[in-house]
Amino acid sequence: MWTPKKHSGGSNRRLWWEPLNDPSNMQRYGTHYWDQDGRQVTENLRGANARVIMDRAIPFIESAAKDGRSFMAVVWFHTPHLPVVAGPRHAALYKQFDSYKKHYYGSITAMDEQVGRLRKALKNAGVADNTMLWFCSDNGPEGNDSAPGKTGGFRGRKRSLYEGGIRVPGLLEWPAVVKPGSITSFPATTLDYLPTILSAVGQSMQDKRPIDGIDLRPVIEGKLKERSTGMGFQSAGMTAYITHQYKLVIPNLKKKENKSGSKKTSPELYDLLNDPHEKKNIAASKQTQVDDLLMKLKQWQQSCARSDAGEDYRVTVKERKATKEQPLRFGAIADCQFADVPARGSRHYQLASKKLSATVKDLNEEKLDFVIHLGDFIDRDWDSFDIVGPIFNSLKAPGYHLLGNHDYSVIDSKKREVVDRLGMPSRYYDFIVKGWRFIVLDGNEFSLYAHPTGSKELDKSKALRKKYGNPPDYCGGMGKIQIQWMLSRIAMARDAGEKVILFNHFPIYPSNRGHNLWNDTELLEILKPFAGTVVAWINGHNHGGGYAERDGIHYLTLKGMLDTKENAYAIISAGKDILQVKGFGREPDRTLKLSTQSLKDRKSVRTDP
């Protein structure tokens, strides 16, 4: 956001100003944007914020819908948070008002247009009927009673826990389930979103962490009329607890002092069904309800404190042991590398989609915890994702991707969209299954192919490649921030007693200048102290495959699915003391023993097939 260096008469830097067209009178106003990989966004930031934000959300949704993937998008508009600046077209709609109101109402209209644009995009993608579209504000209006935002007569405003500060309209559009025009007065909170979404997709929490919200499906379906679980709030020294009918309020102590100077701590009680504007405090006549709600408020606050201290996220030794004893099996595929072009030498590009279909069919017959593709999902061309994406997404087990060099063989304008196209949460990420932590890395962070022409990332990549002696331009390297993130995740796993498997597209051992990550030697030394926690590095890229062990860590390269008319993939079973690799097609079987030797007693062993 930009603010004028010099404000015109009557404008207020906190409330509003006229749109800026003169670069010499522009300076940044606090707000910055970053993408999912932590890079600051500098493009497409001019104009109405709602449009700028929706420009990012809609392509993500359209991509998921095109691939037949489920999706979840959280879209936070700035509007009508202060300051409000409406563009000329929207401001002109409210020229009869003063400048503050003109910009306030104009900004909201601009936001409304973008919500309409989102609804239209869902319809055009053919997913509107079965998509839950939730909309609400985050709190009551800012400012005093003369400000444009109104509470509808409710007491208090933003920063207050009276109804004017927390009661906002909640809208849900879900054509396949909700009848248009349906209205309910059922009290709900955004904390209810999580259990409701889980219920809608047929899932449940996978652990015992306490959830404050409730499933609203019975409310939506007209089967639940009264809320049985209360809603707690605490902010700026004020607390509140709300049930279906009653609301307990503990006022802000700093503002509640009697004539003797002692702070007033008496709770207030309101009957929201009969007194939604909180005009009559009935605490004196409803002591039973007050005592009950005080107890529930205390229990809720204690639960919040436990969560804040991390106690709700710790797994007991018994639970961790039981989880680890469950068998872990996952599928691994390397270098599908599909392209709609004729075969060349041993590389059968068009056949890759058929081999992937056969692989998915076979893997769906197995009981697997997940399947991962180790990069180079396509060989070239953006449209190739349309062919193999739906095939991989038909897996019964959760499917994961990581980035390969050929995944970036697309036009410059699409390079920043590859992560979303593959359905990845970010360029690198981790996940935990049955006591094992899997860390998915990006070996293309510094490379000559993954960044648009003229970008700063490309310039940095050229400098790094030179530093490492100009290794092949079809390989890449990992940066310091990603490596630090990786080490933080390994440390977390070590402290939690988890074993770690690292996934990357590129190998780092044994030494191979033609295929390895640029900074392979550096990473080997970095990982060395973590042997025992890190048990394996699994990758693709070198289609010939291979295996080596060094310092108690197994380095496994899977053969490329692309090569020859024969298939290649693996199912890997992880046990307490062993990794069992069951190869299919050209991929050989392997038994990898997890060493219990101390680091100084280990020797590097190479056993290429």
Image (tube, rainbow, N blue to C red):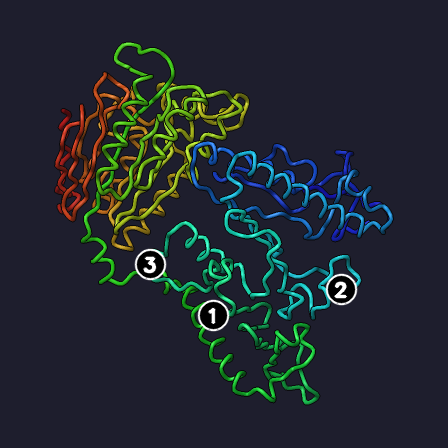
In depth, the one of 426 and 357 nearer the eye is: 357
* Residue position marked by numbered label 1 in the rendering: 229
Q: Residue at x 32, y 17 (%)?
A: 349
| Vertical order, 12 against 381 (above or below) | below
Q: Residue at x 27, y 37 (%)?
A: 525
| Vertical order, 242 against 75 (above or below) | below
Of callouts 3 and 2, the N-terminal one: 2
**Callout 1 crowding tier (Cα within 10 Å): few <14, some 14–19, many ≥20:** few
**Callout 3 crowding tier (Cα within 10 Å): few <14, some 14–19, many ≥20:** few
Residue 408: percent from left, percent from top: 43, 24
Work out which quarter of the rendered image holds the N terminus and state it. top right
In depth, the one of 426 and 292 nearer the eye is: 292
Of callouts 2 and 1, the N-terminal one: 2
Q: Secondary structure at mark 3?
A: loop
**Is residue 584 visible to the viewer in this orientation of the structure?**
yes
Of callouts 1 and 3, the N-terminal one: 3
| Vertical order, 251 against 262 (above or below) | above
* Residue position marked by numbered label 3 in the rendering: 207
> Which of the 4 quarters of the picture holds residue 323?
bottom left
Q: Are marks 1 and 3 in contact (CB under 8 Å)?
A: no
* Residue position marked by numbered label 2 in the rendering: 144
Label 3 and label 2: CA atoms lie apart by: 44 Å
| Vertical order, 479 against 95 (above or below) | above
**Callout 2 crowding tier (Cα within 10 Å): few <14, some 14–19, many ≥20:** few
Identify residue type, mark 1.
Thr
Label 2 and label 1: CA atoms lie apart by: 33 Å
Q: Secondary structure at mark 1?
A: loop
